[in-house]
């Protein structure tokens, strides 16, 4: 789960990481109220989960009430790469002497945590990594050892941070590591971490991705639930507990297992079609789950055919077949289903489907033939053109 | 031969009295696996269909001698269960548990490496491993596998592992061992670990590898294959059409920027001499051709 900047800053603050004084605003008058409270000049910042908001006009400096009104009204409702701004973060402006970068993430290949620190902050770190890799100091951190303050001090020195910033930056790094570990984040990133003209160091931006699997030990994450789902289909799927990602194509996909679902997307693409979604119904493919899945796909107006790809292992195919028939009673589907069932009890399952003689369900013996059939149906139903 | 397990492997099921542990543990026993013990704290002295249950893995090891454990407990309890098994000296731990926090996985991996280097962890979030006709630990349906080799399978995905077994078995091509390493960011056993074992196993004559988007495990495997592997490898990478920045089901399956793409992985594997298939069916066909042409 990706947090918005303002949530990331609130998360940082819990671990003692200094951030600018500010507040959240959903309207122009709220933005003015925040600005009047914290004092001018302020920065009005769009809260969207996409990079490049500054260039898109989503970050503006305001010297007085008039400018806050002007910028807030322009930024609210602004479309930044498909993300419409609904919320602002208004914070006290900072006099910047230098901009740095700091982050923690997992190095999967090394099976260790990775700290990255650079004196070249304020730009995309990928760009720094490409153009000047030597400017990034990296260090693996063994979770059994953690990050002692001496290590953090060595790291900021190696990264070439200004002398005046080093003590404070090292302390922030230790707190940021604690935020990363105890806060169960997949990523914590401060870009830029700034040195102010009066020699203080603080986080001017906050990027935090939380590990959804750790939600059970973070009841405080409740307030973040449902954020970032800009797609109505995904919101609906999430409510039903389905593992769904919306895409742009015309073939709706239902499969059991993430790998098989990904593979189904691949095969649909290879036979000339395009998937409308990724949907993994997992191991519990009973009638209820199947009906929920079909309901979600049915709300997608672009869908012209639905491909159900099940490999029965633990899941028995006859149960899946019955589930589909039950689902058909519950849901008025606007598209036909092409069904591929293999594995445990597949023969019985095919008999069940054949016996029901529903015009809505077409059985195919293999994953490839099912994908071809679904794509053909989708194309003919959308008038052949795509 | 098989890798990691054989017909003599004695298995304990941690969480045998839970619904998952009971269902899969009994299924594994019905397949012919020597399931000798169950472990559930507080339920020591009871039994599940004739399998004695112990309070701790230590007691199970002392009473029965245990070569491998099957960890089928919820995410909160799984890290401790894995480390207890390692502490008890069990050389192989297979963990099917899904949704373990990444921080816990990283901690467990570091702890095993530093304090218990003799214990191999397979998983978490994996279907387990099966050596057809000999031993099945985990959730794979035994009847889709075919004994006798000569193909070894290693896979990051569950259902695609079954698909791979199915494609080969249907054509009459058997497997030596099929290892599901799991789709999480910190797998205990990696592609390279399994490829090394297959390379050393005299009965395995070709390897089928099923990867997916995210991370760089496939690239590291390509490096290993290129420099160290003599046996033919066929690979399929799932997620060729996956969008950037979205987790495709598995915690580990995410393309970030240009990193972790299927394209990059397929190119790395092809450059290492691996035969790369565009879908699982094609991978099966290519492997059948290779097996039929083996001397």
Image (spheres, coloured by chain):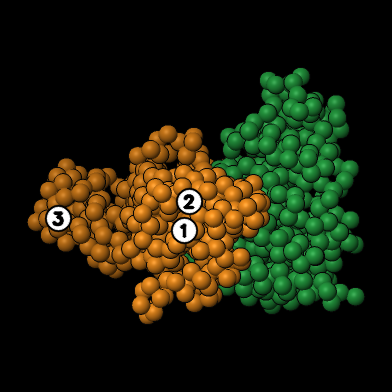
Chain colours: A orange, B green
Residue placed at 69% from the left, 46% from the top?
Answer: B139
Q: Name the residue under label 1.
A: A358
Q: Residue A269 carries which label?
A: none
Q: Which quarter of the rendered picture does the C terminus of chain A lie within? A: bottom left
The local crowd at label 1, few if under 14, some if 14 to 19, many if 20 or more residues have their Cα within 10 Å, is few
Instruction: Please tell me which residue lies in front, B33 or A25.
Output: B33
Give the answer, above or below, for where A93 lies relative to B270.
above
Q: State whether discs 2 and 1 lie on one chain.
A: yes
Q: Please, which residue is most extreme toward the bottom here?
A: A385
Q: Nearer the viewer, mark 1 or mark 3?
A: 1
- What SS does tag 1 mark? loop
User: Which residue does the numbered mark 2 point to in the structure image?
Assistant: A325
Residue at the image position 27 percent from the left and 67 percent from the top: A56
* Both labels 1 and 3 in a single chain: yes
Dot 2, crowdedness within 10 Å: few (<14), some or many (≥20)?
A: many
SS for callout 3: helix
Name the front one of labels 2 and 1.
1
Mark 2, secondary structure of its residue = helix
Q: Which badge, 2 or 1, comes first in the chain's sequence?
A: 2
The answer to whether marks 3 and 2 mark residues whose Cβ atoms lie closer than 8 Å is: no
The x, y position of residue B86, in whole percent, is: 76, 37
Query: For the residues marked 1 and 3, what is the alpha-carbon distance in whole angstroms?
Result: 61 Å
Mark 2 → mark 1, Cα distance in angstroms: 9 Å
Q: Where is residue A183 in the image (x, y as percent from the top left)?
A: 47, 41
Q: Crowding at label 3, few (<14), some or many (≥20) Cα neighbours within 10 Å?
A: many
Q: Residue furthest left?
A: A66
At 16% from the left edge and 50% from the top edge, which residue is drawn? Answer: A27
Residue A160 in the image: x percent, y percent? 49, 60
Front: mark 3 or 2: 2
Question: Is the residue B84 above or below the residue A345 in the image?
Answer: above
Residue holding disc 3: A68
């Amino acid at each position: 789960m990706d947090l918005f900047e303002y949530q990331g800053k609130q998360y940082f603050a819990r671990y003692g990481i200094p951030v600018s004084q500010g507040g959240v605003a959903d309207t122009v008058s709220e933005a003015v109220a925040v600005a009047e409270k914290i004092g001018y000049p302020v920065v009005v910042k769009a809260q969207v989960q996409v990079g490049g908001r500054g260039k898109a006009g989503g970050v503006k400096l305001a010297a007085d009430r008039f400018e806050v009104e002007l910028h807030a009204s322009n930024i609210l409702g602004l479309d930044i790469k498909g993300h419409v701004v609904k919320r602002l973060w208004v914070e006290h402006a900072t006099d910047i002497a230098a901009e740095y970068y700091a982050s923690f993430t997992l190095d999967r290949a090394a099976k260790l945590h990775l700290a990255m620190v650079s004196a070249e902050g304020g730009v995309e770190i990928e760009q720094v990594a490409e153009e000047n890799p030597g400017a990034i100091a990296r260090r693996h951190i063994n979770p059994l050892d953690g990050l002692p303050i001496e290590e953090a001090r060595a790291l900021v020195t190696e990264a070439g941070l200004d002398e005046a910033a080093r003590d404070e930056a090292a302390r922030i790094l230790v707190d940021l590591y604690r935020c990363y570990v105890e806060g169960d984040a997949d990523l914590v990133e401060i870009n830029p971490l700034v040195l102010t003209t009066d020699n203080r160091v603080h986080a001017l931006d906050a990027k935090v991705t939380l590990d959804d699997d750790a939600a059970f030990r973070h009841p405080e994450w409740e307030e973040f639930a449902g954020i970032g789902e800009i797609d109505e289909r995904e919101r609906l799927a999430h409510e039903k507990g389905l593992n769904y990602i919306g895409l742009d194509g015309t073939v709706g996909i239902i499969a059991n297992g993430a790998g098989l679902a990904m593979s189904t997307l691949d095969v649909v693409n290879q036979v000339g079609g395009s998937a409308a979604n990724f949907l993994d119904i997992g191991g519990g493919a009973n009638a209820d789950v199947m009906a929920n899945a079909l309901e979600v796909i049915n709300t997608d107006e672009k869908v012209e055919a639905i491909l159900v790809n099940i490999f029965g292992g633990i899941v028995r195919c006859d149960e899946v077949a019955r589930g589909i028939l039950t689902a058909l009673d519950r849901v008025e589907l606007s598209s036909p289903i092409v069904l591929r069932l293999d594995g445990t009890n597949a023969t019985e399952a095919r008999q069940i489907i054949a016996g029901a003689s529903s015009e809505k369900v077409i059985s195919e013996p293999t994953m490839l033939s099912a994908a071809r059939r679904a794509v053909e149906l989708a194309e003919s139903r959308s008038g052949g053109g795509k | 031969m098989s890798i990691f397990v054989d017909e003599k492997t004695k298995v304990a099921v941690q969480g045998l009295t839970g619904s998952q542990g009971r269902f899969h543990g009994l299924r594994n026993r019905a397949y012919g696996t020597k399931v000798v013990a169950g472990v559930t704290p507080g339920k020591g002295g009871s039994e599940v269909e004739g399998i004695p249950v112990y309070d701790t893995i230590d007691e199970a090891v002392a009473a029965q001698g245990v070569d491998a454990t099957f960890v089928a407990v919820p995410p909160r309890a799984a890290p401790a269960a894995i480390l207890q098994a390692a502490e008890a000296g069990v050389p192989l731990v297979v963990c099917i548990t899904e949704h373990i926090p990444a921080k816990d996985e990283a901690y467990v991996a570091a702890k095993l490496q530093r304090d218990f280097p003799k214990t191999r962890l397979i998983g978490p979030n994996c279907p387990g491993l099966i050596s057809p006709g000999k031993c099945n630990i985990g959730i794979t349906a035994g009847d889709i596998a075919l004994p006798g080799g000569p193909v070894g399978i290693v896979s990051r995905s569950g259902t695609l592992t079954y698909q791979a077994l199915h494609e080969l078995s249907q054509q009459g091509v058997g497997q030596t061992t099929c290892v599901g390493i799991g789709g999480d960011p910190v797998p205990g056993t990696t592609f390279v670990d399994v490829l090394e074992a297959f390379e050393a196993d005299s009965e395995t004559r070709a390897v089928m590898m099923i990867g997916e988007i995210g991370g760089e495990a496939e690239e590291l495997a390509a490096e290993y294959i290129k420099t160290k592997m003599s046996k033919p490898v066929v690979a399929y990478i799932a997620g060729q059409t996956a969008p950037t920045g979205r987790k495709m089901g598995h915690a580990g399956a995410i393309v970030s920027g240009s990193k972790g793409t299927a394209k990059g992985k397929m190119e790395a594997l092809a450059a290492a001499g691996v035969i790369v298939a565009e879908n699982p069916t094609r991978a099966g066909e290519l492997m059948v051709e290779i097996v039929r042409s083996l001397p």
